[in-house]
Image (tube, rainbow, N blue to C red):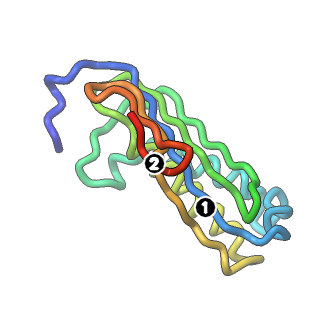
Amino acid sequence: MVDVSAKAVTRRVAEASCRVLLEESTVERLGDLPKGDAFAVARLAGIQAAKRTDSLIPLCHSLPLEQIEVEIEPVPGGVRIRSMIVLTAKTGAEMEALVACSTAALALYDMVKAVERGAVITDLRLESKRGGKTGSWSRGGDGSDRA
């Protein structure tokens, strides 16, 4: 792991997102699938995964997560999953935000596979990060990066 012992403790926020491509008929059923409520299960899976990122990704630091949000919203062609992680620490939470989204998407896939085998998880990406030595970064609305 990288030595962060000399870094300052600062408030850090990381946001990530991904999409799950689904048929409209599947999106309409997400609250009532054979396995149950896909929104609730996926949201909880994302939160749980963020808390375990250091166990899943080699070389990630264990972090004192203070807030985890996972939101799932229907969009044309499927759903968009967003996560936000807040902490006060010596290193950022980008990996936690990405793990939250990816795991929520995998849980959602597991929930819908009985009714739609063709679901696609796509566009996993960091949207923004704030805090720390490098300051703020966010993805431009056109997909570009900006400081």
Q: Is residue 39 left or right of residue 3?
A: right
- What amino acid type is highlighted by mark number 2? Ser
Q: Residues under labels 2 and 1: Cα distance? A: 29 Å
| Residue position marked by numbered label 2 in the rendering | 144
Q: In the depicted view, which residue is nearer to us: 33 or 92? A: 92
Relative vertical location of residue 4 with respect to residue 23 in this rendering, above or below: above
Q: Residues within 10 Å of mark 1 (few under 14, many from 20)?
A: many
Residue of label 1: 107
Relative image position of residue 1 (x, y in whole percent): 17, 44
- Mark 2 and mark 1 lie on one chain; the one further toward the N terminus is 1
Taking the spot 53% from the left edge, 37% from the top edge, the residue there is 84
What is the quadrant of residue 51 in the picture? top left
Element marked by disc 2 = loop
- Residue 38, quarter of the rendered image: bottom right
Mark 2 burial class by Cα count in 10 Å: few <14, some 14-19, many 20+: few
Q: Tell me which residue sits at (50%, 42%) in the image.
A: 140
Q: Amino acid at mark 1?
A: Ala
Numbered label attached to residue 128: none
